[in-house]
Amino acid sequence: MSLMHRATSEIGAAPDEAWANELNDPGPPGHAAQRSLHDLLLRATRHQVWRLRHQLPGAGPADLEDLAQQAADDALVAVLGKLDTFEGRSRFSTWVYKFGLLHAGVAVRRQSWRHREVALPDTFDVSDGGVTPEAFAQGSELSRAVHAAISTDLTPHQRRVTLALLVEQVPIDVLAERLNTNRNALYKTLHDARQRLRACLMASGHLDDPSLRSTP
Amino acid sequence: MTDQNRCSPVEAALDDLLLDTDPYLSCDDCFDQLDTYVEQLLANPGHVDIPMQVHLKACGACAEEAEALMDLLSS
């Protein structure tokens, strides 16, 4: 019995998810189940594409539908490849939705940045719409210390990723694609950079109350 | 009101740069837990999951997906 079969039987599959057990069937029931899965994914991708449509100002309804359909196709492949990892901790439809939302979000962000250059600055000298060097210069001593710590205490890779994500506001999926890496690796780099900045600023006395910036 | 509404752009940028992202949770682990987390949050708005909450505050893309899933399940 697969994990999915066990999970759905243990927690009790909702009526609209009963078809999920047929997904591995090689015959007509399996094909019908995959169509139902695609419909579910399309509900999620349409929802996400329309939520994020402000990022695609030139796109009309047909463009958005194309994007949603393509994202649903991609998500279908991803879900079918991960079926055995479903553990039944949530409803199957909720588990499926997150794949649709992920693929649609990535598709919208990539489409939005398709013709935009991704800046990978080593310093604050290159800035486009983010926090400018002038803004930092006009700020507090803390902001100047942060500026200095970014320049001297981060590795070149940490500096480029941090500035691209937090100053240039490049979406993490777009940056991952341009750097031939993935969201996971970039987030880890950003996490390490933030920890290093915090440690440097606490050591220099510029950040003396870490609890002020640590609440979720 | 968001943090960014309460302070200047520079202060908001500093908050973002200096955000404490411990306990660390990877984007992959966040994705693995997202469906369960959102269902628990919808069932109990006071549900606490510190690693997820820290990650979602620090990662805009994952946070966007969590909001969209909340939205979708609530619609």
Image: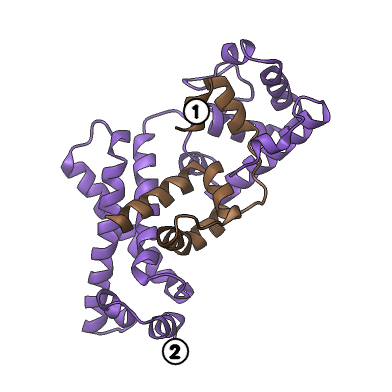
Chain colours: A purple, B brown
Determine the residue positioned at 57% across, 20% down: B10
Q: Is residue A112 visible?
A: yes
Could you say whether the residue bearing mark 1 is in a helix, strand or loop?
Answer: helix
Q: Position of residue A173 (x, y in %)?
A: 47, 44
Q: Is residue A182 among the parts visible in the rendering? A: no
Above or below A44: residue A202: above
Q: Which corner quadrant of the image does residue A41 belong to?
A: bottom left
**Viewer-closest of A90 and A102:** A90
**A42 or B1, which lies in front?**
B1
The residue tagged 1 is: B4
Q: Is residue A158 left or right of residue A22?
A: right
* Residue B16 in which image quadrant: top right
Which chain does tag 1 point to?
B
Which quadrant, please, contains the C terminus of chain A?
Answer: top right
Would residue A100 be found to the left or right of residue A136 on screen?
left
Co-location on one chain, circles 1 and 2:
no
Circle 2: element type: loop
Q: Amino acid at mark 2?
A: Met
Q: Label 2: which residue? A: A1
Q: Chain of mark 2?
A: A
* Three-letter amino acid code at the position of disc 1: Gln
Q: Residue drawn 46% across and 81% down?
A: A3
Q: Nearer the viewer, residue A99 or B37?
A: B37
Q: Find residue A197 and report its horizontal and vertical position in percent.
A: 72, 33
